Image: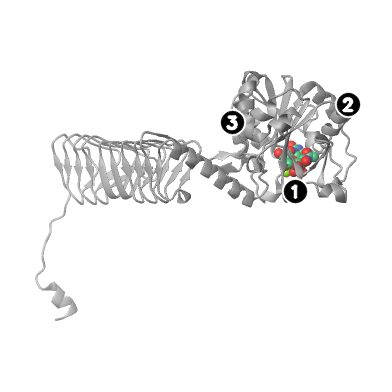
Amino acid sequence: MLLLSIGYNNKKKYISIYKGLRMSISIVILAAGKGSRMKSTTPKVLHEISGKAMLFHAIDAGQKISDDITVVLYHQAQRVQAQIEAHYKNINFHMQDAEQFPGTGGAMKGVTTKYEKTLILNGDMPLITQDSLLALTGGDADINMSVIQLNDPSGYGRVIINNEKVQEIVEQKDCTEAQLQTKTVNAGIYCVNTQLLNRYIPLLSNDNAQEEYYLTDIVKMAVDEHKTVSPIYVEEEEFKGVNSKFDLATAEIIMQNRIKKELMEQGITMRFPDSIYIDCRATFEGECTLENGVTILGASKLINAHIKTNSIIEDSIIEDSDVGPMGRIRPLSYLKDTHVGNFVEVKKSELIGVKAGHLSYIGDATVGEGSNIGAGVITCNYDGKAKHKTTIGKNVFVGSDCQLVAPVNIEDDVIVAAGTTLNKDVPQGSLAITRSALKFVPNFFYKFFGK
Ligand code: UD1
Ligand code: MG
């Protein structure tokens, strides 16, 4: 009961005691469930939260404390495994025989782990933190189990505690009237002595209301053998399972708040943070400002950047530059010492020391220092078959409403006159101009509309 009395709020102290044990824990992530309440053809655990599949959030938290991670799969197993393998090395997979052995206990049948303790996580708990995992893996109890106190315990397995000792977990569908009143519930994450786990799993039965093999039954088995079972009281927010699109949106809000709080603590300024969206992979350095309605996607990197109202940055680096309002920087762009104004779209381009103030499309281009891109300039990078590059040198002035038909190269110190359609390379120091002659027809207005 030592852990019970230390409690969740003192977990920091507790973690520091047990930090030395970090890499001797095995982790099993249960991700075989169907997730039918998501009403989606995408497997539940691949739904994204803040730019990353929820299963990956669990794997990332796990990898911070363990080098032996096994993911249990069944529904759409190949698709989930392929996604995991595209992002991670060294993850083990176990295929559940869910037809014969359904349920969380069935999921553990045949799983082998490397270390003395096995931490069992759910693939649909993306909000769990490394600190909580460490709190669950510490101590010398035979089983640490995560427990939450809830006003409304419905849906959860109830934890029956007598004289401060855990007796068993009873699933809601198997509860007596009296047991249903219990407000202490099983949060669904356990750290178990591996030897015990290996001995108990084959002994599980499906003699219950759902005819499933319940992992939770190992608790009563341990109690009957006078093993120690420690309840670790955890925060509901972190252990909430995502089962529906509403849960997904709720988890996203919680994660967004965490990301933004951490960044503000780091010194990032945010105007109306509730209107801002930031991918969990994005990083910030120096003094950055995000105005309202800004969206930062992918692994973008912002260094001393000012992103103005309603702009979108995706998988790009913005350094000592400002964007927007209503600017859009698409993947693989690099902006340095650059001003990008309203309604400018940049894609896969490098702009260093550039001004592009209004209404432009700059795609597959490099633009050199001191160059100005006038309003309405378009790089015509696509000919219907392939994408082509535009290269603009230093100190180039591209006047308004020009079309730069790629592939095209503009050397340094060039003026491209307003309205020019450029389809040839421009040598250094030149003026490029295509313009049909201007003529006046006297009194035409009056002839046409009458006086
Ligand atoms: C489980 C617990 C319950 C607890 C709750 C907390 C059991 C029997 N009950 O119930 O006490 O309060 O979690 O959220 O464990 N899974 C598989 N294979 C299966 C079934 C499930 O891998 O055959 C995986 C799911 O993908 C999921 C996890 O196990 O990640 C939990 O399954 P779920 O069906 O949500 O369990 P609950 O019924 O909610
Ligand atoms: Mg559940």
**Residue 408, horizontal then vertical, whole percent:** 27, 38
Between residue 428 and residue 268, name the one nearer to us. Answer: 268
Q: Residue furthest bottom?
A: 451
The crowding category of the residue bearing disc 3, from other C-alpha atoms within 10 Å (few below 14, some 14 to 19, many at least 20), is: some
**Residue 225 bears which disc, if any?**
2
Q: Quadrant of residue 236?
A: top right
**Mark with earlier residue (1, 2):** 1
Which image quarter is the C terminus in? bottom left
What kind of residue is marked 1?
A: Pro
Q: Are marks 3 and 1 in contact (CB under 8 Å)?
A: no
What kind of residue is marked 3?
A: Asp
Location of residue 182 with respect to 413 vertically, above or below: below
Q: Quadrant of residue 254?
A: top right
Q: Which residue is mark 3?
A: 60
Location of residue 199 with respect to 33 vertically, above or below: above
Q: Which residue is mark 1?
A: 153
Q: Nearer the viewer, mark 3 or mark 1?
A: 1
Q: Secondary structure at mark 3?
A: helix
